[in-house]
Image: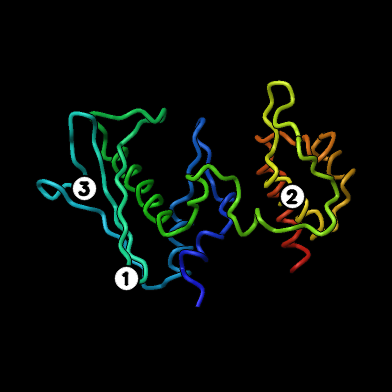
Amino acid sequence: MESVFKKLYETNVNEHIEKKGNFSYLSWPYAIAQLRLADPTATWEVKRFADDLPYQKTDLGVFVEVSVAVQGVTLSQIHPVLDSKNKPLMEPSAFDINTSIQRCLVKAVALHGLGLYIYAGEDLPQADSNVEVSKPLVAVKPARPTHQGDVALLTDKQLGYINKLVSDTKSDVPQLLAFFNFNSLESIPKSEVNRVIRVLEQNRQKEAA
């Protein structure tokens, strides 16, 4: 039987990442839904501290802790209560604490696989990024540049996955490039990768319907 960790780790969560300022967060309702679909018996618990409070104050800030149990394995995550700029709050509001608990819950779920590749600095889950494309539409050169001026370009893993989506959907590459106003797939800015992948994945879903 395929392990729950493997199933969750290979799930592409990019479409469910929420941007707030310069930071990215995985939607907690989506994380819980995927967790329960993978293991209906999964449970989670918010730790209670002194006076039965769901947070603990320290000299460094306020912290919360959430544990998630999957198939008998319990893993916990500690998370500081932060402001919108990811700075510790010494006197957080109830809303700040609740938000931190939700983020802590998502990170605890990530310990069981879902979205873990994001925290590991990867752009795609290994199951997607390691797929070999038999006939890539754009040749990947060994020394492909990583920047175009000051603009960071997509990684080789991202390019490989986009090539796979293009192949799966039989997309017209010149038309696709014209739509996004790019010169080539290799020159897609890293900041635009998720938008391109989202469009191609939506086209693949339409064809499968």
Per the image, label 1 sits on a secondary structure element best described as loop
Q: Position of residue 4 (x, y in %)?
A: 46, 68
Q: Nearer the viewer, mark 3 or mark 2?
A: 2
Q: Earlier in the sequence, mark 3 or mark 2?
A: 3
Per the image, label 3 sits on a secondary structure element best described as loop
Q: Position of residue 61 (x, y in %)?
A: 24, 31
User: In the rendered view, would you say 189 is above or below 32?
Assistant: above
Which residue is painted at 32% across and 58% down in the image?
75
Which residue is painted at 74% across and 49% down in the image?
162
Q: Tell me the CA gap for discs 3 and 2.
A: 43 Å
Give the residue pinned by disc 3: 54
Q: Earlier in the sequence, mark 3 or mark 1?
A: 3
Q: Which mark is residue 72?
A: 1
Give the residue pinned by disc 2: 162
Q: Position of residue 9 (x, y in %)?
A: 51, 59
Drawn side of residue 77 relative to residue 185, left or right: left
